[in-house]
Structure formats: structure tokens, C-alpha cells
Image (cartoon, coloured by chain):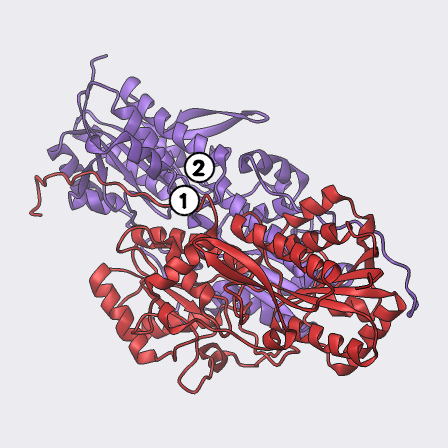
Chain colours: A purple, B red
Amino acid sequence: MSVLEGKVLIAQGGGPTAVINQSLAGVVLESRKFPQVTRVYGAVHGVDGIVNENFLDLTQETTHNLERVAQTTSSALLSTRTKPDEDFCARMFDVMKAHDIRYFFYIGGNDSADTVRIINEQAETENYEFRSIHIPKTIDNDLVLNDHTPGYPSAARFVAQAFMGVNLDNRSIPGIYIGVVMGRHAGFLTAASVLGQTHPEDGPHLVYVPERPFDTKLFLDDVENTLSRHGRCVIAASEGIADENEVPIAQKLVESVERDAHGNVQLSGSGVLGDMLANLIKGHLKTKRVRADTLGYLQRSFAGVVSDVDQNEAREIGERAAHLAIWHNLDGSVTINRTGSYSVDYRLVSLADIAAKTRVMPNNFISKKGNGVTDAFRAYLRPLLGSRFPSTYRLRAPLVKKLRTKS
Amino acid sequence: MSVLEGKVLIAQGGGPTAVINQSLAGVVLESRKFPQVTRVYGAVHGVDGIVNENFLDLTQETTHNLERVAQTTSSALLSTRTKPDEDFCARMFDVMKAHDIRYFFYIGGNDSADTVRIINEQAETENYEFRSIHIPKTIDNDLVLNDHTPGYPSAARFVAQAFMGVNLDNRSIPGIYIGVVMGRHAGFLTAASVLGQTHPEDGPHLVYVPERPFDTKLFLDDVENTLSRHGRCVIAASEGIADENEVPIAQKLVESVERDAHGNVQLSGSGVLGDMLANLIKGHLKTKRVRADTLGYLQRSFAGVVSDVDQNEAREIGERAAHLAIWHNLDGSVTINRTGSYSVDYRLVSLADIAAKTRVMPNNFISKKGNGVTDAFRAYLRPLLGSRFPSTYRLRAPLVKKLRTKS
């Protein structure tokens, strides 16, 4: 096998995560070790940076700064929502050929995998020697063939710590609390809310994921039952919950539906779903104190809450990608596979098997009634949250005998 | 001076904070050292627990568990929004006499200080030997005579880290981002958003606090100017922003105004202000990508983001309160005073000087145009955020010369 000499190009696409720069640092630092790599470029704003030839020469970036960037949340190369069509890919490919780019790494979700697949096909058609690898990232955890995806564990940790806190808050001043969590089609991130539970009656008491149809009547029954049992109710609801006809509950409310370039309806960046659910409860149940928060962009960008397991894996999957392309001359998508409790390895799969496909929560992770999650899910998620995950403690002192009133 | 023998009673009132249990632990552990203290009781759900005689015997709580509870966010004794009137205070006082309570500590905001003041007056009228101390806490930082209040530094740290992240997110996929921050009358918490800035053009680019009238036209001008300068715009807006007639912007929008027992309009627990501001921008500026998050209850309850300076001070102010009442036989409210850069001491002031008064941001903390904060504010807040405050790093590699397109 002859050695393929040329440049490396790296880009980041889609929504940022807390560890996406770990994968970037992994690719850059590992690529720079190979003598056949003449330069390591980074495209600014993902695929847009490729057609516009906006490249940073990462060969000239210090190792020390790369290590600090790796610790910084969000896409250091900046990102894009552009979904390239065949023509756009042809233009990208033209630029890459002009710069003698022979290795392409795209860190992104399943749309990004599809982009890599198209470019790869183009290279084969034109008989241009070219290796391209998709490196997964998504807080939604919705890539097929992956045990989980880099970015999800840190976002899950944020959601778990958020609900750990709001449960205590709700316990101290009882009422109904609704927290709306990101996740268009997959409920993994919403389900993470239960990992903040310590004591038996800790919330969230109800969890609604997009994998089950959302029924308004059953929802109100659930809330009423929880209230009579605990005197309070903490609810985690996915932004993507939909009715039995798969119409998103949020979409029913938004006056002017805004769609992105991928044809998706805007679900994040608005408090409308939470407020609607709160008004629904206020209108039907005799309870005054109903509060709704939409956890919003903090879930994927918050600086300072990160899983070290996630950091390590995101770094290593970037390094692995460099090895697979440059050492082993392979194309594909690198996946994370769970091998033990807890250990993982990384496998290369074909881009066509990942691209534009969506994984949802398996049935055994969702409770029978569809309003909670199972211990199987807890066992799945816990090792991903990493070390120094907080816990909560409560007073256990005995009650004092009453002197003035009957107990 | 004769030694006053009897029981200690502690309660927590109002909204929880990340360090309110530090003050609880401080009072309990320090009180238990005094031989004249026969028991240390905790009232469950604040003043409601007093009239209902719901007391925990904290003399029987382990020191080890108290230390772990101190690390847990939110009120471990549970809280209440009840604002006692004279009659309610008389009933509380009746219960306290029945239990031979001689020392009362109430951890809360300015409403709680007023409660302590009324009970104290009642004791004097009845010639009942009784010491009562108010221990400050509020994430709003709006107590007079305090350099700052326990709970604020940790909430400020959360807000700063949140904006640190959303600024990076907004930089990677440009658009307009609005983050709505708690603070009914005082803008201290909203202003904290700027402490997450590292680089010159980092957001939030615009900060709106309740201390200045909010003008819709000037707001849209500010956003447009920021967009033309940075190509994006991150906005921090206080939930309490109001027009020139002091009508809250949020209140104008809420269909059915909900008020709490203190006569306050509900501003938190709804995304309506953020969504309204986003729609305002969408309606007037030619920009599509506008997102709004309401940071919500996470600001005061999030488990795992805390300032160690805040923890230390909250603990010590509780200990001080115990000393002032039990050693020195004094009543009042304990305040935090800044003595150096950075050091503090604690002083006792009269309850009447604190009770039911509200501090707002001084003029020199707010920029002349009223849409930002000053370096004086940055210098004020930075030491409070504590150690290991994160920073952000960006790539500094040179741009590559274009081959296909003109730069």
C-alpha cells in the first residue's frame, strides 16, 4: 500500500456540544504526527468554509492552545446549519482538490455523515485518491450503530444536575414544575433527568419522551395522581413530544412555524411548549403554583459542566479517526461500542449505514405507561456521566412532639 | 449579664439558594457548642412550620450529615412564601414560648427580616427574654447595608457560566440570542452575565436591568447596531425590566396576572418575556435566527455550580449569628461588609434598617447608555465568583491563502 501524501481538512457541523473540540484536538494532534501529512487545515463554519475557502492552518496552532481549546465548549472552528446538496458537494470537492486535500474529517450528526458520504462518492467517481471520515457528535444521542455519541454524556449530566436542583427547589416550595428538554425525535436527553434522583420520592416524577404519543388527558391524570401522592410534581418533557398523529405538541402552538434548511421545525429557543403545558394544567387542575422552564441552549453549551468520560471518548474518537484514515487508508464513520461495564472500543462502519438515519430510545428504556424510564436506562446512562457527579443530602433529624396542636 | 438558657429555633424562608444550607449548618453546629442551649430545633417550611409546630430536633442530627446537607442546594428545612402579619406572628410567638425557645434565627430576604422584626417587638412587649437574628440570603442581592448577600455569588456564577457558553454557541452559529435572567427590582444577577466574557467581542453585547426604563425603540436600535458590528447579538435581559411608567414588560404580556402572597406579579417560571422580545425583533429587523431562553429556576437551584467564596461566607455568617445571639445577647441582622480586595467582615445592624427595603444597582455599575455594565461592576463581582472559574479559548491559527476565490 502506497502512502497517500497531502493535506488534512477538518470541519465541525451542526449544533455544538461540550466536547466537540476534544475530537478536533484529537484529529489535529494525531494527524500532525504523520510525515505524509503536509498541512492540517480547519474549515471555518463547517461546509460553508469549504466552498468559501475559509481555512485556518492548524499546523501553525500551538499544541498548548489546542489543549485549552479542547476544554472549551462549542465548535472552535465555528459551525453551520447548511445541508449540502450534490451541487454544493461538487463545489466543496473542487476546492479540496485545488488545495490537495487528501484526508477529510467531519465532526457532526447524521446529516454530516450524509455529507461525507456524498463527497466520498464524488471522489470515487473522479478517481481522486481521498479518505474521508465522519466523527460522531450530537447531544440528542440519535445516531444508529453507536452505544452513545460524544456530547450526549455531558449534556445528560447538565440535565441531570438541573433536575437534581429543581427537584430540591420544588420540594422546598411545593407546586408543579415542568422542565422542557432538547430532543427532537429521541428522548435520551429528557430521560437523563432521572439520574439526578437520590431519594425515593425525588422528581422528576413524570418523564415524557417523543417515542410515545403524548395524550393530554393521560398527562393531566398523571399530574393529578402525582400531586395526590407527593403533594407536588416535577415533570421532564421533551421538546419533541407529539400527538398520536406525530404532530409535535409545540408545533400546534407556534403561530408562524419556522423551519431550518433541513426542513425541521424550530423547537428550541422558545418557551412556548412549557408555557402551554403549564396553562393546560392551570386550566384543568385546582392548583395555582405551576412553573415551566425551557432548559434551552444551556444544555449543549454551558461552560463548566462536563463528563470526563465524554471528554476522553471524544478525544480518542478523533485520534482513532486520524489513525483509520492515515494509517489504515479507510473511509467511514467511527462508532462507540460498549464492551464492558464500563469500557468501550471504536469501530469503523460504512457511511451509508449511519447517514441520515435516526436512532430512538429502545422500548426497554421506557416505562410501560410511557411516562417514565426504567432501571435499564439508569444502568445505561450512569457510567457515561463521569466522575464527581454530585449527590443530594437531606436532614434526617426526628420530629419534635407538639405541645400546642394535635399532630 | 446572666446566661439565657433555652432552645434555639432556625427557619429558612423565601426562594432557596445554592448555599442557604451552609448558613443552616453554621447556626446548628455553633449553637450546639453552648451549654445554655438545651435543644436546637428546625422549623419545617419556614414560618408555616412554626405556627403548625413542625419542628425537627436538629440536636439529634449527625454532624457528618449536616456537613453534607450544607453542600446541597436549596432549603433543607424546606421553605415558604407566607408573609406573616401581626396575628400570624403572635401565633408563632405563642408556639415559641410554649417550647421555651429563646433564640430564633431566620435565614431569608428582606421580607424575612421584617418577620424577625415583628416577632422581636412582640417579645419586648411581653417582656419575654428572647434573642432573634436575621441571616441574609437572596440571589437578587437586593438587601441594603450589605456589600452582597449569600446566595448571590453562586447564582451569579451560574449566570456567568451560562452566558459564557451561549456566547460561544451564538458565535459558532450566528444569530440573535436573548437570555432572560431573574431579578425583579435589582439587576445584579443579570449584570453577572458579562463575567463570562473573555475576548473583546464576546457577548452578552447588550445588558438590560430593571434600574433603567426599557424603551422598545432604543432596544431595537441597540440590536441593529450590534448586528452590523458583530454579525450576531447576545442579549441579557432582566425579568424585571419595565417601561418608563414602571410597568414590567413581562406584565404587559401575561394574560392572567398571577400574584403571590406578597403582592408580587409572577415573573419567573414562564418563557413569555423572552418570546415577546424575540417576536419584537423578528417583527422589526430583517433577521430570521432569533432564540430566547429563560434561565429559570436553574439559576438558584442548579446542583454543582457554586462559588466557594459564597459557601464560606454563608457558613460563617450563620456561625456569627449564633455567636451574636448566644455569646453577646444581641438582636439584629448580620451583614457582609467588604473590607479589602478581597476580604470581608460581618456586622450586626438593626432589623428596622434592613426589613422590607430594597437595594438596587448603584449608578456607577450601569453604563451611561443603560444597555451594559461598567468595569466597576466587574471589579465588584469577580472576587465573589470564587476559585476554578472557567475561561474560554479559541483557535489563533493563521488563515490559509485562497486559491479559487478572491479573499
Is mark 1 in CB contact (under 8 Å) with mark 2? yes
Q: Given the image, on which type of amino acid does mark 1 rest?
A: Thr
* Residue B383 appearing in the image: yes
Secondary structure of residue under mark 1: loop
Give left or right: position of B228 versus B208: left
- Viewer-closest of B204 and A52: B204
Q: Residues within 10 Å of mark 2 (few under 14, many from 20)?
A: many
Circle 2 residue: A150
In the picture of the structure, the residue carrying the numbered disc 1 is A17
- Residue A168 on image: x %, y %: 66, 55
Disc ID at residue A94 = none
Q: In the shown orientation, is residue A125 left or right of residue B65?
A: left
Q: Residue at x 45, y 39 (%)?
A: A143
Callout 1: chain: A
Above or below, B115 against A198 in this view is below
Indicate the amino acid at tag 2: Pro
Q: Position of residue B72 (x, y in %)?
A: 64, 49
Judging depth in this view, the residue of A70 and A49 nearest the camera is A70
- Height in image: B84 above or below A388? below
Q: Quadrant of residue A46?
A: top left
Q: Secondary structure at mark 2?
A: loop
